[in-house]
Image (cartoon, grey):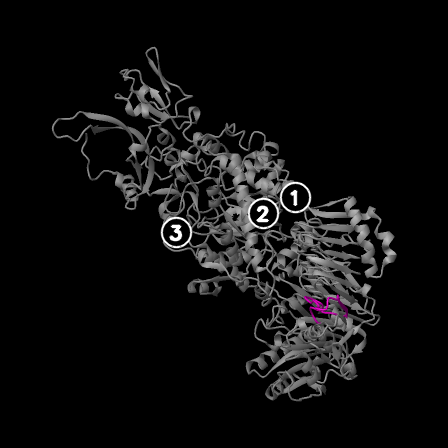
Amino acid sequence: MAAVKINEIHKSDLPWIVEYDESKCIQCGKCTAVCSFNAIKPAVEYRKKTNSILEKDKLEKVLVIKQNISLDNYCHGCGMCANVCPNGAIKLIRNKDDKYSVAYRSQKADSFKKGGRSNLNTEGRTLDKIKVGRISQMTDPSLDAQRHTFELRTPFGRVLKADKLNFGVKDGNIIETTKLPPNRWIYPIIFGDMSIGAVSWRMWEAMAIATAYLNEVMGIPIRMCTGEGGIPTKLLKSKYVKYMILQIASGHFGWNRIIKAMPDMTEDPAGILIKIGQGAKPGDGGLLLANKVAKYVQEIRGVPKADLLSPPTHQGLYSIEESVQKMFLSMNAAFKFKVPVAIKVAASVTSVSVYNNLLRDPYNIVGGFFLDGLAAGTGAAHEISLNHTGHPITSKLRDCYLAAVHQGRQGEIPLFAGGGLGQTGSFAADAFKLICLGANGVFTGRMLMEIAGCVGSDTGRCNACNTGLCPAGIAAQNENLVKRLDVDKVAQNLVNYILATDIELKKLMAPIGCSSLPVGRSDALITVDKHISNRLDIQYAC
Amino acid sequence: MCRIGAIKSKQKLHPSIALKLMRSQQEGHDDSGFAFVMQDMGGLFENYKELPLLSMAGTVEGARLAEDILRDIGFTRVMQWSPDINNKKGLKIDALPMYIFEVLQYPKSYKHATKEEKEELLIDTSIKLRKALEENNSGYIYSFWPDTLTLKEIGSPKDIGTYFNLWDENKDLTSSIITAQCRQNTNYDIVRYAAHPFFLEGYTGLVNGENIFYEKNKSYQERLYKGYLGFESDSQCLLYTLHYVHKILKWPLKYFKHTISPLSYDEIIKREDSEILLRIKASLSHLEVNGPNTFLGVTPSKELLCVCDSKKLRPVVIGKDKDTVIMTSEVVGINDLMPNRNIEEDIYPNERETIVVRDDLTVERWQQ
Amino acid sequence: MIKIKTLKNNNRMSTQELLQMIYKKIEEGHTDFEIEACGQHDIGGALWSKVEKPLYFRVTNPGQRVGAMAMDGTKIVVEGSAPADVGWLNSGAEIVVKGDAGDTAAHCAAGGKIFVAGRVGTRSGALMKHDPKFEPPQFWVLKNTGSFSFEFMGGGIAVVCGYDCEELNSVLGDRSCVGMVGGVVYVRGNVEGLSPSVEQVPLDKFDKDFLKSGMPEFLKEIDRLDLKNKLLDFSEWTKIIPIPKELKKKKLPVKDFIKNEWFSDGLFGDLVEDNGEVYGLAEEGKARLRKPEWDKNLCVGCDLCIKNCPQNAIKKESDNYVSEDEKCIGCGICSAVCPRKAWKMIVNR
C-alpha cells in the first residue's frame, strides 16, 4: 500500500462525505450505477475476522461502496445514490470544512467553474422582508381570488405616452393616424432564457410544450425566451413561434437558421430579447463547456465541439448610442418593425442610466427592459463571477421604476425583473412584490429547473450544470442522462406550477382589492426593515 | 361612503335642492361636511357669465392676501356676493371668518386675449392663490373660473345649510347645474380641499368610492399638468383623468371610461377598435382606477356624466322629469324630490356604462 | 294602525329614532304600520309581535335594507322603489317592492318571499341559501337584474320574469351565477355571460308546476295579474342550475396535447434520435451510464465476477465471460472484485 501524504487530496477536502452503512448494504450496485459523477465505486476492502491477539488472523476481503477521492470525479451531493438505495445504506454528509476550491485552484492553475447559482448567500433576502400589508377592509372590498375575474396581462413592447399616440378623432371615435411601435399583452411571467445546450433538448422541449399548452389550452398567455443556442427550424415555422421570444446574445449562435427560416415563418415571434448581460455573471459572456456541445448543438449553433465562450459584449456595440441605434434598429428591422425588441442586462449600479437612456430614445424602438439580479442561475460560470459580482434585483428594479416616475414616463418601457425569484419557495409572492415595486412582469429560469426535478440548492448541493453530468437530465447532454427526463411529466409539472402560481397571484391581488396587475402599487407593501423602507420608499411597519 | 348628487335642470335651481337631495341619504354620510359646485349661474350672477368668479374662504388676512395678488395681476372686482350668515348657537359647523364670492374683470392687457390665454391666466392665478394661502394657512380657493361657484365646509350638512341660510329658496343664488356631496371622510384627516366636488377648468367631479390606484394615479398625474395638484382625496385623480382625456388629449368623452376601467384584453380583442383600446390601456395604465367607485362629472359644455367601476360596487341611480335630471347615490333622494316621476325611466347604470346628460337634457347611454 | 311621518320641516328622524319608535309601538301591541320614510334603514326587520298577529308595514321611500332579517309573520309593502339590500337575510317575511329594488336585493335571503315589481340591481340574489329544515326562500323579479346576479348562490329559488326586457342582451346582466353552488334561477328571456360553472336547461314538469302555482300570487302582490298568461308561456323560460363538480369539463391533459397537437416526432426529431423512452435510475441495458468490458488476456477464470454480480448478468460461454446487456446495470462490482482487473468499466453510449 502506498503511503498517504499530506499534500494529496483527501476525503476531508471534498465538499461531500459519502456515509456508507455496510450492515444495511445488500450490494445491489444501484448506487454506483446511478452516479453520473462517478464519485462512488464498488471496492474490495480487507477486514480482520477477529480481534484476538492470540493468533495471526487471515484478512478477509469484503465488498463495499467507496467514495472517489479525486478533483475530477467527486461527489456533488446530488443524492441519486441515496434515492436508489433500497435500504438507506448510503447518505451524503455536507463537509463544512471542505477545501475543494483551494485544492482545485492550487492543482489546476485555473479558475473554478460551476453551474447553478452562487452558494455564497450571506445576506437575507430583501423580498422576504416585505409583506403585502395594505389589505382592503371596510374602505373597499377585498375580491374573491377563485371566482372574480382578474386581468393578469401586461404590455410587452414600447408604450407611448398618450399625447404621442397621435390619435385622430373621426365621428366621435379615435382613429389611428400613425404607425405605432409593436406592443403585445402577455402574462407577467416569462420562462427565462435558457439555451439549447445549456439545457438538454428534452428540457427545452418540455418548456416549449408547457408554453404552447398554457397558451392554447389554458388561455394563459405566457411567453418563453429561447436563450441563445439556436432554435429548431420546425418550431420557427410552426404556429407556436408566436409564444417564443427569440434571444440574441453576444455569441449570435443559431441566427443563421433563424434567418433562413424567415421566409417560411407563418407567425411572428413574440419578441426579441437582446441579451447584454445576465445576473449570475454580469460582465461575462455565455459559457458552454465542450462536454456539453453535443452533435446537434454543434449543428444548430454552427460550431465544432469546443468550449464555447461568448464575448462579454456584443462585438460592434461599444457605446449605448450604438447599442440602441444599431442593435435595436437591426433587430426591429429583422421582423419589419412588427415584433417588440427588448433588452436584458444584469442589474448594476449603472442600470438606471441605461434605462434613462433607453427611455429617451426618440425612435421608440426599445420594447422592454429586463433586469437580472445577482441571485440568478446559470448553466456555467466562473465561481468568482457567481459569488462576487452583481447587484440585487429589488432595489435596482425600484430605482429604474422611480427614475421613470421622476420623468413622468413610467410604463413606457415595460420592466421585467428576474434573478433568484422563488429562492425561498415563494415564487408568486416574489413576482407580486416586484410588480408592486414597478415591474410589469418577471422572468425565471431557476423555477423551471426546480419544477423539472433539479436537485441543486443554494447551499451547494449539485450545482454541476456546467459538467454536462446533470443527474436529472436537465442540464445534461449525455443521452443516457437526458433520457432520464420525462418530457410529458416535466411539461405537465411546469403547467401545473404556473396554474398554481396563477391562483397564488390572484390570492395576493384579491385582498388588496386589485382586479388588474398592481404595477407600481408600492403602497400595498410594508417592510419590517427600516433600511429597506428607506431605500425602496415603502412603508415601515413593526 | 359618501353620498353624492348631480342635478341639471332647465330651470335655475337654488342649492336648497342639493340639501334636500342629500337629506334622506343621511345614513350614507357622517355629518363631517357638505360641499357643492354651481355651474351655469342664474340670479345675481346671470349677467357675468363670461367673467371669472372667485370662490374662496379663509381668514381676514387670507382675504387680503388674495386681494393683493389679484390686484397685482391686474384683476378688478366687478361684483361681490356674501352669504347671509345665520350664526345661531349650537350649529355643527367649523366655519371660517370670510367667505368670498366675487366676479372679477380680466386685466386690461387681456382685452384681446384668446379664450385659451384667459384660461391659462385663470389656472396660473388659481395656483398662485392656493400656494400663497397655503403658505400662511390663511384660506382655501375652491374655484376661479367663469360661471362657477363653490362652497365647501366642515360640519353637519343640515347645520351648514342653516349657517349659510341655504334651506330657504331664493332667486339670487341659482344655477342650472348643482353638484353636491355629503361627506363621510373619516378615513383621513378632515380637510376642506378633500371635499367633493372637485373643480378644474370647467370640469367638475365627485366620487363615491375608494380609488386604490391612488398612488399610481398620483405619481403619474403630478407630472402631467400643472393644474393637477392637491391630491387631498384619491377621488381627485378621477377628475384629473377626465380633464386629461377630454381637454388635453381632446378624446371623445367615451374614452374616459376606457381609461379608468379598461376592458380586459380578452374582451378588447373581440372588438373592431381593439388596436385603439389596447393602446389606451397601455399608455394610460397609470390612470386606471381600481376599487369601488361611482363617478359623477360635469363638462365645460354643461353635460353631466356618470360612470361606475368595473364591478359596479357602489350605488347610483338617475331619475328625470321633464325639466330636471338627478344623478345620485340612492334612489331615496330622487324619491323625495321627484315623487311623481315615471320610475320606469329611472336608470340604474351598470359596470360598463357611461351615462351622459346633454345640455338639452337628452340622456345618452353607451356601453363601454 | 300607526302612521309615522319621518320628516317634519327640515328635521328628519334618524333611523335609530324611527326604529325605537316602532319597537315601542310593537311592545304596546300594535301590528299595523304606515311609515312615510325618508331613507331610514332596516325598516321591518327582525321584529315579532307578542299578540300573535302578523306585522304589517306599508312604507314609502325606505332606505337600505328594508326587510333586513325580517321574520315569518311579517309583511312589508314598499310603495315605489327601494335602495340596496332589500330583504337582506330575510328569514321568512313577505316583502313586496312595487317599484325597483337597488343593488344586492335578496342578498343572503334564506326564507320568505321577496316580490319586486320592477328591476333589481347588481349582485341581487347573491348568497341566497336554503336551510333544509325550512321552506326555501323565493325571490321574484318582474323585469331584470343587474350584473353579477346570484353570485355564490347556495340555495333557494329565484324567478326573473324578463318582462319588457326584450332589447336586453341578458336579463340577468353580465357574469351571472358566478360561484353558484345550489338553488335554481328560473329565467325568461335572453341570458348571456353566464358563469361556466352553471348550466341553462329546459324546465321540467316540477318547474312548470312551481311557476304555475307561484306566479298568480306574485302578480297579484305587484298588481300585475294582467301579465299572467304572457308570463306562463313556458316556451320562453329556462332554468339555471349549478353543474355538479364531477360533470365539469376537464382540461386536456398535457400528454394528450403532446400526442395530438405537438410535433409528431418531437421538436428535435430531425436533430437527435430520441424515441421518447424515459430511463429509470440504475436501469439495465442501454440506459446504463457505464458498462463492463472483459479482457480475456487478464482473466484467471476465478468466477468472482459471476458470484458477485448483483444482477446475475455475467455468464461463462465456453472460455469467455459475457455480461448480458439486458441484465447489467453497470454498477462496476465485477470490475471491483476481479483480482486481475479483467473487467473494466467504460462509458456506455
Specify which label sits upstream in the sequence, 3 or 2: 2
Q: Which residues are magenta?
A: C40-63
Query: Is disc 3 in the same subunit as disc 2?
Result: yes
Chain holding disc 2: A
Q: Can you identify the residue that label 2 sits on?
A: A332
Chain holding disc 1: C
* Residue A38, numbered circle: none
Image quarter of residue A361: bottom right
Chain holding disc 3: A
For the residues labelled 3 and 1, the Cα–Cα distance comes to: 56 Å
Query: Is disc 3 in the same subunit as disc 1?
Result: no
* Residue C244, numbered circle: 1
* Left or right relative to B344: residue C48: left
> Which of pointers 1 and 2 indicates the residue nearer the eye?
1
Q: Is residue B179 visible?
A: no
Circle 3 packing at 10 Å, graded few (<14), some (14-19), many (20+), is: some
Q: In the figure, A247 relative to B19: above or below? A: above
Foreground: A111 or A134?
A134
